[in-house]
Amino acid sequence: MAVIELYSVIRFPMEGNEHIAVRREQTFISRVWPVREPCPLSQDAPDEVCDLFLEAG
């Protein structure tokens, strides 16, 4: 199955030498195609968690 993902890399430079060393790095991955289907929650999930998933969906 083919998947198209978008990768965004953010690099945080070291103090004082911003062009050479990297202190840390974060990578964000977003699937563009095919659209991901929401995963069903367990029946045992607390109501607070269910509410968060409903808002995010």
Image (cartoon, rainbow, N blue to C red):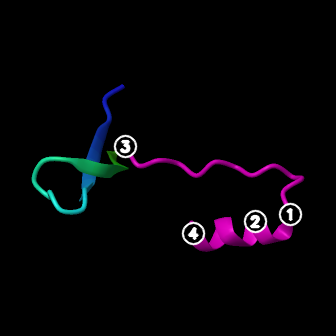
Q: Residue at x 31, y 29 (%)?
A: 2
The magenta segment is: 35-57
Q: Earlier in the sequence, mark 3 or mark 1?
A: 3
- Check disc 2 and give the amino acid type: Cys
Instruction: Kindly identify the amino acid type of the residue bearing the numbered disc 1.
Output: Pro
Compared across the picture, whether 53 is left or right of 19 comes to: right
Numbered disc 1: secondary structure:
loop
Cβ–Cβ under 8 Å for marks 2 and 4: no
Could you give the CA–CA distance between mark 2 and mark 4, rounded to whole angstroms? 10 Å
Magenta span contains residue 47:
yes
Q: Mark 4 points at which residue?
A: 56
How much space separates mark 3 and mark 4, taking CA atoms?
19 Å
Q: Does the magenta stretch include residue 44?
A: yes
Task: Please tell me whether mark 2 sits on a helix, a strand or a loop.
Answer: helix
> Closer to us: mark 3 or mark 2?
2
Residue in the image at 20% along x and 47% along y:
21
The residue to which callout 3 is attached is: 34
Q: Residue 46 carries which label?
A: 1
